[in-house]
Image: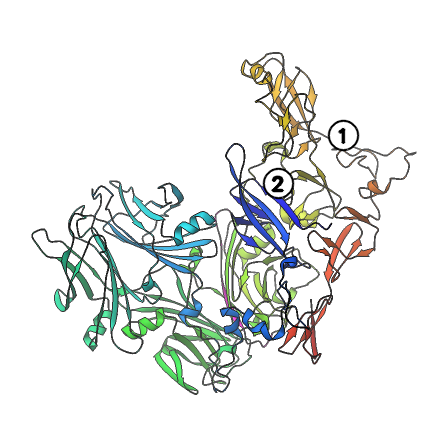
Amino acid sequence: MPVNKLVLLCWSKRCSFGGRFYSLEDMWHPDLGDPFGVMHCVMCHCEPQRSRRGKVFGKVSCKNIKQDCPEPSCDDPVLLPGHCCKTCPKATESLFDGFEFFQEKEDDLHKSYNDRSYLSSEQMNTGDNFVALLTGVTDLWLPSSSGVARARFTLTKTSLAFSITYQRINRPSTILFLDSEGNTAFEFRVPHAESEMICGVWRNLPKSHMRQLQEEQLRVSIVATDGRREEIQGKIIKHRALFAETFSATLTSDEENSGMGGIAMLTLSDTENNLHFILLMQGIIPPTEKGESHTHTLQYRQHSLREIHANVTAQDPDFAEVLTDLNSRELFWLSRGQLQIVVETEGHNAHRISGYITGRKSCDTLQSVMSSGDALTPLKTGAVGSAVFSLHDNGTLDYQVQVSGVSSTVVGVTIEMKPRRRSKRSVLYDVTENFAAAAGGGRAVGSYGRMEARHIHMLLQNELFINVATAEHSEGELRGQIRTLLYSGLDSRTHELPFSLAGQFVSPPVRTSAGGHAWVSVDERCHLHYEIVVNGLSKGDDLTVNAHLHGLAEIGEIDESKTNHKRLLTGFYGEQAQGVLKDLSMELLRHLDKGTAFIQVSTKMNPRGEIRGRIHVPNSCEFGSRGEVVEEAEFDDLVFVRDPEELRKDPHTCFFEGEHHAHGSRWTPHYNSCFSCTCQKKTVICDPVICPALTCPHTYQPDDKCCPVCDERKTPKEIPAEKTEEHPEGCYFEGDQKMHAPGTMWHPFVPPFGYIKCAVCTCKGATGEVHCEKVTCPPLTCSHPIRRNPSDCCKVCPPEDTPLPEEGELMQADGTRHCKFGKNYYQNSENWHPRVPLVGEMKCITCWCDHGVTKCQRKQCPLLSCSNITRREGKCCPECAGNTHKNTHTHT
């Protein structure tokens, strides 16, 4: 009977699998890494479990889902790439989701200009949006503050990015997210800054809190402690107006401790000068009132322009309206942030709140990557342009534009709309006069203070472009859509220009249609944070992009056979990548500091580099990255920290589960915490934890332990009694839970690692203390010492009459070494097809033993030029339907 289910336990409120963490109830296809790839026929699930002590933990359960595939109704079903189940060829179109279908559409091929780069704000919407109005109102109607804040949230996968603006309250110190029961679900410490904007990310949202967010059960609270303590709070809700919002206003009251406030979300009509707005208000109507008349006024310098009367209630204080046919003066004042919304109640106890309308505020970045592939007439020049914009309340637009890799002089830099007719450009603003030319490009830095309200609306709806014309290409060599890049927590985006990535920077230069830019920073712990955006890639490369960080003195020094100064930057999703590297070597950090580091983005067509850029990040990390302390390490004097670069250079280092381990080191593997692994001269040996013998009559196996323990409910606890009495005639050791006689020595047992033979513990009888120290190995005089057993701490000199080691010991000896893969041993130079649990034999992957090191490679497949690609069962490579393909390139 084949195994069809695999279960791993993870002792926390999330699951760890393959070096990645998943929230409770997450589901995914496991990625076994190169060359195995994603197992599409295996589905893993992070199941919430509860131990006997009530502790919640995650259990990873994986099963083969191929047996659940429906039976195809056709005679000749095909297997599509990235799918587990076969489908009928005629039904394949329905399998594409909206994004994939959009990528493949060719509706505009008849046009003479290229607008394939254009993505509307709807198509670019990568997450769910939420909003919250925060005021000082409490459940007991005891206002504690006059402060008002507006919080905007975007949920992407398991992260919640937020942008918060506030008025009439001191700089907040803490942001609290409260669950449906009022408990703190997440706390964010606000950094000290002069800005009135608070930016942050709540990462790894548990599924339970994600559900509460979708059901509008979460609240957000901000606390200010500078001076007197103030707190304002509000409910996080979904709102239909968030998607189209391009203008906003925060309404406050002049009354002290009023607890009143409101926010307005506004947008212009696409074709007419109508201003749509929705008001959310809190505290302006007492809860005892059934209804009250409101006057909503649009004012300019306290002069009323438009006036609306309405009745609202405390239970439903929201209000929506359309101001039609704004004239040119009103539109001008709107663009300059000089229009004011005023809400007034009528009666003897009248209240008033008001606020100015400005362009929508957020922590997101307005940016553009300009590539030759997105020019109106598509090109492949290898040049790149990069631009960053900032919109102020008064309608002023700051811009920074840099151009690199062009072969002729830049003659025009313009901000434009989408072409209305064939090859007919719609230029809005010309900023060429501020462009300073340099070799291969140049830079423009300046401000444009005459933006119209309509163009602000289009800018925030991702409907504007930036175009760079050169002497050789007068209509445009580079072009890019100005897009909003969601805040990711990388603060360098707010005060630094990104580094340009161009094909002209690759060695040798690549005339590619793509371009890109990257933000890179090094924090105080010497962790590298990066965010990369690329544009202009061909459709075939969109899903096969990877990036590396190189540390080299000159551009032409890349040698693919040497990986000492090369790190993979993971996390590419479509055209973006972001992540953190926590274990950079001192060498790479020095290259970053000197400006001799590079980021290189590679694709299937250009595996040796499609675009590239020099990275200069000054830092003072003299001793390499200071990684996070491992929580499980209880004996600090037994943990040795070596520079990762030195580990890679050591010929005896082991590489296991994506990490390097020093020879002789011992660790707990990710795949099973009840195993203990050791590195012996490039060979990893993993054995189950040795459980101590128990003398008690009743035992049981706890859910969160590797070994059985005595059932204290049925066995009298004698040892703890001696422990609490501080018995002077022995020592109690927590590891093996035993009493040790005074003066005795033993190897400590530390769950889940087992017996640590490289340490010796001693019982000091006078004090009852246990003292543990590392074993000091004696110096050896022989030239080829051996380790008699893999678990021994010290090597010894072999006697002259020592027989030849057996097969198992041969792995530890010098000379030609065997390889261990799974539970099998293989001779040097032997090759085999690996077997993967739940999947079976991987016939498309071949592994071989290279002097004790197992190496695996997937079969190379030809690159297909046809559009209808299928994958048949039993075949390693995809094929063209009808066998009409033509091989143009070989890839892995």
User: Reading the chain from its start, which is encountered first: label 2 or label 1?
Assistant: 2
Q: Label 2: few (<14), some or many (≥20) within 10 Å?
A: few
Element marked by disc 2:
loop
Q: Tell me if residue 863 is in the magenta stretch.
A: no
Can residue 18 be seen in the rendering of this structure? no
Which labelled disc corresponds to residue 778? Answer: 1
Front residue of this view, candidates 116 and 844: 844
For the C terminus, the image quarter is: bottom right
Picture colour scheme: rainbow
The x, y position of residue 875, in whole percent, is: 73, 67
Q: Quadrant of residue 588?
A: bottom right
Front residue of this view, candidates 41 and 814: 41
Q: Give the residue drawn at x 54%, y 35%.
A: 51
The x, y position of residue 207, in whole percent, is: 47, 49
Q: Which residue is mark 2?
A: 641
In the picture shown, does residue 465 fall above or below 64?
below
Q: Give the residue drawn at x 26%, y 69%.
A: 276
The x, y position of residue 396, in whole percent, is: 29, 69
Q: Label 1: few (<14), some or many (≥20) within 10 Å?
A: few
Front residue of this view, candidates 386 and 666: 666
User: Which residue is the extreme one toward the right?
Assistant: 801
The residues colored magenta run: 510-525
Q: Amino acid at mark 2?
A: Val
Q: Is residue 355 left or right of residue 819?
A: left
Element marked by disc 1:
loop
Q: Nearer the viewer, mark 2 or mark 1?
A: 2
User: Which residue is the extreme one toward the left?
Assistant: 348
Q: Quadrant of residue 485?
A: bottom left
